[in-house]
Amino acid sequence: MAQHVTERDVRDIAEYARIHLDPDEIVQMTVDLNSIIDSLKPITEYDLEGVVPTFHPIGSLSNVMREDVEVTSFTQEEALSNAPARQDDCFLIPSILGEGGDR
Amino acid sequence: MKTLEEVLQDWEAVIGLEVHCELTKLETKMFCGCKLEFGAPPNTHTCPVCLGLPGALPVPNRAAIQSIVLAGLATNCDIEKHTMFYRKGYMYPDMAKNFQTTQGPKAFCMRGHLDLTVDGRGAKERLFWEDLAEGETSENMTRTADGYVAHVGITRIHMEEDAGKMVHIGGGEGRIAGATHSLVDYNRAGTPLIELVTEPDLRTPEEARLFMHKLRQIFLTLGISDCSMEEGSLRADGNISLRRRGSKEFGTKTELKNINSFKNLHDGLAYEICRQAEVLEEGGKIYQETRHWDPSKKHTIVMRVKETADDYRMFPDPDLAPYDLSDEFIERVRAKLPELPDQKAARFERDYGLSSYDARHLVEHRFTTEFFEEACAEAGDRAKELAKPLANLALNDISAYVNAGEGIDFSKTAFSPARGVALVSLLAEDVISSKQAKEVFAAVLEEDKDPDAIVEERGMKQVSDTGAIEAVIDEVLAANPDKVAAYKGGKTGLIGFFVGQCMKAMKGQGNPKLINELLAKKLDA
């Protein structure tokens, strides 16, 4: 089996995805990911010259839109029902480091 | 630190803007039917889609897509028919699904541009335009009679969604520094947001300010957003780098955030340009980082070192079907395009004979535009004759009044367009002097009465009776024979003295134009 991704790549991917993997899980995940990529190998054997890439898994659907009309939202109680902690009708979460994100 | 003027002698600033605008005029969010409402109780407008619950399926808001196409058409963009939504990795708790839905390499609107007219004090920030002949173009600027036009490219406008709101507690004043916990309100999560990205075509802080101002006027005219910089429905980030004059290479850029007013945009960019010049001139290095403008301390501080684009892990959103906009869809939106500020200004010049300066400044604010248009309609056949004084009234007295009071809605004051026409008519017919007109303007606002009534009550009528004025002149000349002799001997500057004496004798109510004319006639006879 070819080595498409290394254990280091897997560690980086896990970090991006905020998924914790133990060292033995990283070893196993590296084996699994390489075998998944191997299984896609037949694609490279087709002659795809001039074929338009498929960017989207939804085949023939397009322009799906809804009208700008309000529908009933959750009640505040429903919205907060899964919150591990709450305060002042908000989700109470541990402090994050860094300032917000990019928008 | 050197001043902006000194820095720009040696360095060229290269500025691009990223402008976010919430589509606040819509009823519902981008991908779900939750209501858009500023200031609602926390977490009362949420659903499985905007809370990112498993299995929830987003459906785009048709009115949001129409709004962005409208914005694209109004900023000379090509409308891209084949586009789709992407997921952008976003690991912050104000977006519960851990990604932001946005657009990929192709946005709904691509390759637009806006032209900025820069003159007066604002033009001083840019160098070398005076070396061009009128009408001549160099790089992205074209020389005009008293300034230049900057042609600013728009890379794209894409559709995305806003995040929720976080309040940080335990650190004092809601700041994140030292905070122990945060409170999250998801009402704003999923608000339709358009992001406009310019080409790095701006060269001065003033051009950046004018660009934002113009864009805001356009979006307000389109009616897609309330565009409030204070409330955050219109936000600007600036990208700035410097290069030595004559160099074509771009320097390393920094990104400036926390800009919530036009003044902050200008001052923040000006500071950052000067800061970068100082670092570079001392042999230092500019790091690609995000900096935060602190208007009270008047400096920028590092927020964080910028992540690379790869970290966003963009990929097509499998839950959202791609777009294949029809010509019919685009044309239906185009039919809704209102008259834009530039077109309005051109019409004011054409129909009312206003100068381009007056026309341009009238359309800069809604209250001046509306007042002028309604007053011209009110003036009917005399609109062309009264247009110039009406424009002066709007740009001077009304602007000063509105600027002096925070958040005044001028259309709700006692000074209606009809009263404006009455006031400038009194002035045009020489019934009152321009000084008296200012008093009447203030009195109308104060007492809610018609200008004619105020003039009548206060006995302000200007005396334009030739006989009466001549009688006063004769008295004044008779009382000052030495000065008359001096005048005739060549001291013609004494005319001012005589006018003053006549005005004094008439308690300020003489028509100064007429007094001048008649005095000159008598003295030069």
Image (cartoon, coloured by chain):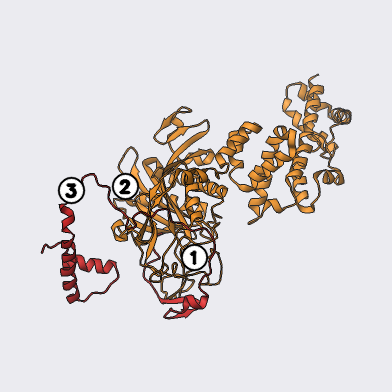
Chain colours: A red, B orange
Which is nearer the eye, B47 or B109?
B47
For residue B17, side relative to residue B493 (left or right): left
User: Within 10 Å of the Cα at label 3, are there few (<14), some (14-19), or many (20+) other Cα atoms?
Assistant: few
Q: Position of residue B198 (x, y in %)?
A: 41, 46
Host chain of mark 3: A
Q: In this view, does B490 lie above or below B509?
A: above
Q: What residue lies at 41% left-to-right and 36% top-to-bottom?
A: B140
Residue B251: mark in rendering: 2
Amino acid at circle 1: Arg
Q: What residue lies at 39% left-to-right and 66% top-to-bottom?
A: A99
- Real-space CA distance between mark 1 and mark 2, rounded to the nearest whole angstrom: 37 Å
Front label number (3 vs 2)? 3
Q: Name which of mark 1 and mark 2 comes first in the sequence.
A: 1
Q: What element carries label 2?
A: loop
Amino acid at circle 2: Gly
Residue A47: mark in rendering: 3
Which is nearer the eye, B126 or B224?
B224
Tell me if residue B206 can be seen. no
Q: What residue lies at 11% left-to-right and 62% top-to-bottom?
A: A2
Front label number (3 vs 1)? 3
Q: Position of residue B384 (x, y in %)?
A: 70, 32
User: Within 10 Å of the Cα at label 1, are there few (<14), some (14-19), or many (20+) other Cα atoms?
Assistant: many
Q: What element carries label 1?
A: loop
Q: In which quarter of the image is residue B113?
A: top left
Quarter occupied by the C terminus of chain B: top right
Residue B512: mark in rendering: none
Residue at the spot of label 1: B188
Host chain of mark 2: B
Host chain of mark 1: B
Q: What residue lies at 74% left-to-right and 43% top-to-bottom?
A: B420
Q: In which quarter of the image is residue B311?
A: bottom left
Do the residues at pointers 1 and 2 share their chain?
Answer: yes
